[in-house]
Amino acid sequence: MHQEYTIIEGDFVNAGKASSSVKKTLKQLNVDPTVVKRVVVALYEAEVNAIAHAYGGKVLVDIDEDKINMVVADKGPGIPDIAMAMQEGYSTARPEVRDMGFGAGMGLPNMQKNVDKLNVTSEVGVGTTVEMEVNFN
Amino acid sequence: MTLREIVNLLDATVHTGENRLDEEITQAFASDLMSEVLTLTDTPLLITGLCNMQTIRTCDMATLDYALIVRNKKPTDEMLELAEDNDMVILSCRYSMFRTCGILYQAGLKPLY
Ligand SMILES: Nc1ncnc2c1ncn2[C@@H]1O[C@H](COP(=O)(O)OP(=O)(O)OP(=O)(O)O)[C@@H](O)[C@H]1O
Ligand SMILES: [Mg+2]
């Protein structure tokens, strides 16, 4: 099953719409609730990052029998040092983003903790792509 | 303690989930940082000063059913609609975070960590 969502620049109110929808789908498919939580927490963090740190983008979701693959690709400033960005507590979030309840520098570490495979690629001045995979059992 | 007792202790407003007020709460977690909330594996009462759509979305993703918004902030209709869709209980009170936590701690609510 393939699903696509668009993330609109600055659209904080709708951040998490893709994750909500994926949550509903996985529930319907009777995926283990603890696995569903891991999937949607990771996807939500990636969605928020595409709004908080970039100018929006796309979410591509592929659901198989035994796993889910998620790609969040944004247009944005990119991440100059991915290893540094992955460290807990590292954040360049703007004051507006902090006012929205984000900017703890825990999003990427949260994704890492919750998924089975995480791949972050980024080109400075172009954008960032986060690919995640979670096995259902 | 029950949610109803929490409402009475804090003179809180019940925005959604009136029908769930007799449910028992044993633990609470207080934070304004949603990524911190998203690390939780347990499902305590969330006490937060953050009052926007992300408060509700975060609870949805983190499977938290109960949120208490402090500092006299009022949830928007849009927030409450989403909360209702998710069958959540949303409370608010006028006390500060520190005072709210103090009252609930004294009344026996346990910290998560
Ligand atoms: N999509 C992105 N585009 C550009 N920079 C990014 C992107 N995602 C993350 N970053 C950079 O990596 C840092 C760490 O990201 P992470 O998600 O871990 O924390 P945060 O978003 O700052 O705070 P939190 O996720 O805890 O709310 C960000 O502050 C930002 O500098
Ligand atoms: Mg983040």
Image (tube, grey):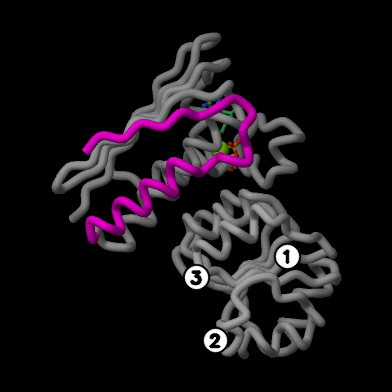
Q: Is residue B103 visible?
A: yes
Q: Are marks 1 and 2 in contact (CB under 8 Å)?
A: no
* Residue that badge 2 annotates: B23
Q: CA distance from mark 3 to mark 2?
A: 13 Å
Q: Nearer the viewer, mark 3 or mark 2?
A: 2
- The picture quadrant where one finds residue B99 is bottom right
Instruction: Classify mark 2: helix, strand or loop.
Output: loop
Give the extent of the magenta segment.
A1-30
* Residue that badge 3 annotates: B43
Q: CA distance from mark 1 to mark 3?
A: 16 Å
Q: Nearer the viewer, mark 1 or mark 3?
A: 1
Q: Position of residue B52 (x, y in %)?
A: 69, 51
Please determine whether, in this image, residue A60 is positioned above or below residue B27: above
- The picture quadrant where one finds residue A130 is top left
Which amino acid type is shown beneath numbered disc 2? Glu
Give the camera-side residue of A119 and B53: B53
Numbered tag placed on residue B69 in the rendering: 1
| Residue A31 in the figure: left or right of residue B8 | left
Please determine whether, in this image, residue A51 is positioned above or below residue B35: above
Q: Position of residue B101 (x, y in %)?
A: 75, 74
Please determine whether, in this image, residue A45 is positioned above or below residue B93: above
Q: Are marks 1 and 3 in contact (CB under 8 Å)?
A: no
Q: Quadrant of the C terminus of chain B?
A: bottom right
Say whether disc 1 or disc 3 marks the residue closer to the N-terminus.
3
